[in-house]
Structure formats: structure tokens, C-alpha cells
Image (cartoon, coloured by chain):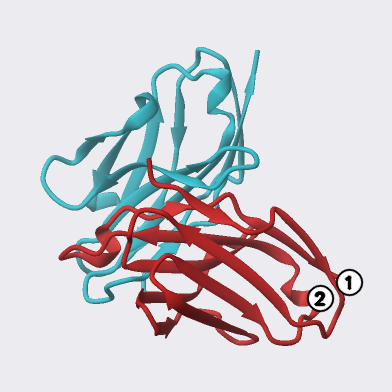
Amino acid sequence: AQSVTQPDIHITVSEGASLELRCNYSYGATPYLFWYVQSPGQGLQLLLKYFSGDTLVQGIKGFEAEFKRSQSSFNLRKPSVHWSDAAEYFCAVGESGNDYKLSFGAGTTVTVRA
Amino acid sequence: DVKVTQSSRYLVKRTGEKVFLECVQDMDHENMFWYRQDPGLGLRLIYFSYDVKMKEKGDIPEGYSVSREKKERFSLILESASTNQTSMYLCASSLSTSGRFRDTQYFGPGTRLTVL
């Protein structure tokens, strides 16, 4: 079974600074990878996903993520954060052959300071 | 826009009560999901449904059941609520295409359930 690790529980970043959130997965084959964001009081929203092809994926709200097979990682980045990016971010992995199940990481909470 | 609504944002129940959490989606999605979200654990799948009256257990189905009588509505039932079921419950839906879990899941705002 696959597992997902988000090593950082909480990150604080200044507005305008860059942001990188780490995600590592454990899975034998090529995984299907997702990043979701949960703003306060709201449900999760998909930021981006990777299935195959170009390993650098562009998403909504100015986010991008890079799949690195050698490092089993799918880190999320944003060059310049806005106060509205304060939220909890979840990495998720889908397993080929298990049609419905996504495994989620524990989440990283991002605080943006002025 | 896809809309997934959940019947309550906050719910307080007593131990032993039967609890119903309702979820409705307005986009004619085949798949619907119930997750539980706890700090430090992320989201864990309780049950999902890929069609009316069809359901499959997820990772943590014990103590829960589900009902899907209509395509747009998916109910989570706590037969006899216990304090360890105090949590945030999230419903999601997705349109079924060739790769089911690859379909974007759309989430509701969640129901924060407290069992006293």
C-alpha cells in the first residue's frame, strides 16, 4: 500500500516570499499525485495533479509542483505568496489498480505574515 | 461550478445517539465519498459509492454505514455515536471517467461533529 509523508506540519512565510511544501510518497509503480488546499472553513480544492508526461505541473492560484521519481517526491511551490494562501495543504497519492482510493498526507499548515 | 453541500457545519450529539450526516451534489456525479479528517492524520476514507445503492468500504468503515438512494445524495450514518467519532467529516464527489480516482474530487465544506 502506498503512503504519503508531508514532513512539515507548519510553515510560516512572509507575504511576497517563496513557498515550498514537501511531499514524499512510498509506492512501487508510478503514482498519481495530487495537491489539495483547504482554506479555513472550507472544503478541499484541487490545486494540481500529475499522471504522466512533463514532470513540472502548473496548477491554479500560481502554484506548481515537480515530480521527481528518484527522490519519490512531489513538492509544491509558489514564487510569491499572498495572504490568501494561508491554508492547509494536502498531498495525495492514487494507486493504479485501486480505482477509487486516494491516500492523503497529514497536511501542512501555512501561515502568512505581513 | 460544482457544488457539494453538507447538511450541517456543526453538530453536537450524545454518546449512543444515531447520527445522520447528509451530502448533496448538484453535478450528476457518479462517485461520492465520505472522509474523516483528524489533526495529524490527514483524510481517511470511510466509505464510497460509485452508483446508486452501490457502496464500498474504505479504510475505516467500523462504526459507520452509508446510504445512497438517489444519485445526488449520500448519507453517512453513525449507528451509535461514540466519543472517538468526534471529528471533521468531509463529503466529496467526482464524475466517473476511465480513471476513477484520477477524476477530480470536489469537496463539501465539512461537518464538525462533537460526540459528548
Numbered disc 2: secondary structure: helix
Chain corresponding to cyan in the figure: A
Q: Colour of chain B?
A: red
Provide residue B2's location: percent of width, then percent of height. 39, 46
- Considering the numbered disc 1 on the image, is that residue within a helix, a strand or a loop? loop
3D distance between C-alphas at marks 1 and 2? 6 Å
**Mark 1 falls within which chain?**
B
Q: Position of residue B63 (x, y in %)?
A: 65, 86
Q: Look at label 2 and name its amino acid.
A: Thr
Name the residue located 35 percent from the left edge and 68 percent from the top edge: B31
Q: Which residue is mark 2?
A: B83
> B19 or A11, which lies in front?
B19
Q: Which residue sits at x=47%, y=26%?
A: A19
Farthest-out residue, left: A53
Q: Residues within 10 Å of mark 1 (few under 14, many from 20)?
A: some
Q: Is residue B8 visible?
A: yes
- On the image, which quarter does residue B13 sit in? bottom right
In-front residue for pair A17/A89: A89
Outermost residue, front direction?
Answer: B70
A75 relative to A8 in the view: left or right? left
Split into 4 quadrants, where in the image is the N terminus of chain A?
Answer: bottom left
Q: Position of residue B107 (x, y in %)?
A: 48, 53
User: Which image quarter is the C terminus of chain A in?
Assistant: top right
Q: Which residue is mark 1?
A: B116
**CB of mark 1 within 8 Å of CB of mark 2?**
yes
Q: How many marks?
A: 2
Report the residue at 32% width, 53% height from top.
B104
